[in-house]
Image (cartoon, rainbow, N blue to C red):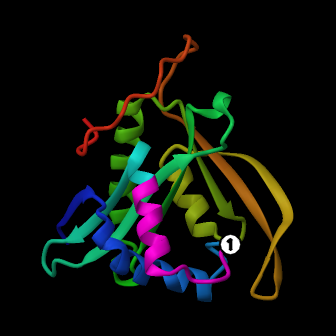
């Protein structure tokens, strides 16, 4: 299927929330236990777009949003400024056809344009598909936290994965403000 990748807009919140809600209610992919409101999702998109990339994939045949991806601060302390944490969510009918890889590649291009050094993924350890996906795209496991979350009646481990986006050990430059196209 052909997809258009574009920056998210706050008016996408309802469609994005429809994709995200089943991950909250039915899986351990997200550690949220309550589905956020549309207003909260709008605020998340606004916060994300204020400093980082927040992308949607639009199915060009139907015009509906098939998935979304974003990255944001890894931690709040200034020394972490060049490390980001990413997330990708796809509607069920759009999984397994390469869309996740397309969104990840576009996110990484945005990271590189912005001067991000390290991309980090936090994955529920039982989500072997996501771990394999990230490994396929050059991420490596860098740690595990045992039984650090509890959801749907189970204690859950998380696996941390990372990928170097910009090479070298030079003094870091301030992060660049992204243009809407990440160029």
Is residue 69 visible to the viewer in this orientation of the structure? Answer: yes
Secondary element under disc 1, as helix, strand or loop, is loop
Q: Is residue 122 magenta?
A: no
Q: Nearer the viewer, residue 116 or 37?
A: 37
Percent of width and height locating residue 112: 40, 32
Q: Residue most toward the left?
A: 61
Q: Nearer the viewer, residue 37 or 182?
A: 37
Is residue 52 visible to the viewer in this orientation of the structure? Answer: no
Percent of width and height locating residue 177: 36, 33
* Quarter of the figure with residue 129: bottom right
Q: Is residue 117 above or below residue 32?
A: above
| 77 relative to 120 in the view: left or right | right
Identify the residue shown where x is 56% and y is 31%. 82
* Quarter of the figure with residue 58: bottom left
The quadrant of the picture occupied by the N terminus is bottom left
Q: Is residue 33 magenta?
A: yes
Identify the residue shown where x is 63% and y is 68%. 128
The quadrant of the picture occupied by the C terminus is top left
Identify the residue shown where x is 82% and y is 82%. 154
Identify the residue shown where x is 67% and y is 28%. 79
Give the residue pinned by disc 1.
Answer: 31
* Quarter of the figure with residue 54: bottom left
Percent of width and height locating residue 108: 40, 42
Q: Residue most toward the top?
A: 170
Q: Which residues are magenta?
A: 31-47
């Amino acid at each position: 299927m052909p997809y258009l990748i574009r920056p998210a807009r706050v008016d996408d919140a309802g469609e994005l929330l429809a994709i995200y809600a089943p991950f909250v209610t039915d899986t351990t992919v997200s550690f949220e236990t309550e589905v956020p409101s549309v207003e909260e999702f709008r605020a998340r998109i606004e916060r994300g777009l204020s400093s980082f990339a927040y992308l949607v994939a639009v199915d060009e045949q139907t015009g509906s949003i098939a998935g979304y991806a974003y990255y944001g601060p890894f931690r709040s302390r200034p020394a972490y400024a060049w490390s980001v944490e990413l997330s990708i969510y796809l509607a069920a009918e759009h999984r397994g056809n390469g869309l996740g890889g397309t969104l990840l590649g576009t996110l990484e291009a945005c990271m590189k344009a912005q001067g991000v050094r390290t991309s980090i993924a936090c994955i529920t350890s039982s989500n072997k598909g996501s771990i394999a996906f990230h490994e396929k795209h050059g991420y490596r496991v860098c740690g595990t936290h045992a039984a650090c979350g509890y959801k749907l009646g189970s204690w859950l481990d998380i696996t941390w994965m990372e990928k170097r986006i910009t090479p070298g050990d030079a003094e870091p430059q301030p992060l660049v403000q992204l243009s809407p196209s990440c160029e």
